[in-house]
Image (cartoon, rainbow, N blue to C red):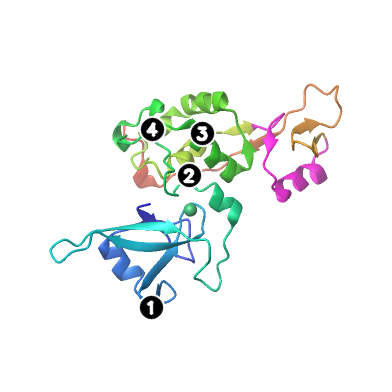
Amino acid sequence: MEIFAKIQKPYRWYLLNNKNVRSMLSAPPYRQKNKIFAICPYCFNPIQVILKGHTSNNFGTYYAKHLIHSPFDKVEINLPRLEHCILKKQERLLAKGAVPANIDLNDFDIAKLRKVFYSMLHVTMSGAFLRRLLVTTKKALYYTYADEYNYPFMMLLEMDYLLLNHRHLAYYPPLIDAINDKSKYFKVTSSKHEVVTKDENDEISRLYFVFDGQQIDPRSKLNF
Ligand SMILES: [Zn+2]
């Protein structure tokens, strides 16, 4: 992984380079003895920053790895999020060599994308559905700052809603309870966490996730 975040604003990420490491991670709690720690901007779990290839005439490069024990007093490891983190070693959303400016829909690893949305929205989507979603949110390809790390968020910006009827939810009690407690027409089955209508003969009710009032950074306008 080539990016990191800090504890207070884990969703804001920075490049792992010498300048950022020195200016942002050189004091506790990030620096502890000779080790440097930070936060993964994707799963918000702690990571260790490591310098590799450092020699007398080559500074080397930084990379980060996930940890299974937290070095921070106030940060606990969230295992389900860690399991689905796209920034772990061997986890790439895009085919190797895909350049952000020329991302092709075929460059995406659909299985990884499934994991990302499962982790972000707590909803299971089929590979076929995700392929269709990639096509319908294709405009996200043209956002100036679209890259491997934030592409799923760009897709969300291009989505108005997601139909939840008959979708399977991750075991995420806040969402399941919200539907079971508050919805007049829907419930979540206890076995497979499928979103179904309370009345089996009800064929017209629809339950949506609505992505409303979304905005993009004005500097990140479409670059057609
Ligand atoms: Zn992570």
Q: Mark 1 — residue?
A: 33
User: Amino acid type of disc 1?
Assistant: Lys
Residue pictured at 85% horizontal, 25% vertical: 200
Q: Mark 2 — residue?
A: 215
Mark in the foreground, 2 or 4: 4
Mark in the foreground, 3 or 4: 3
Residue pictured at 75% horizontal, 36% vertical: 192
| Placement of 136 over or under 146, stated as above or below | above
Query: What's drawn in magenta, residue-wise?
Result: 163-184
Labels 1 and 4: the sequence-earlier one? 1
**Magenta residue check for 164:** yes
Q: 122 or 61, which is in the foreground?
A: 61
Residue pictured at 56% horizontal, 33% vertical: 160
Q: Could you say whether the residue bearing mark 3 is in a helix, strand or loop?
A: helix
Q: Mark 3 — residue?
A: 111
Q: Mark 4 — residue?
A: 141
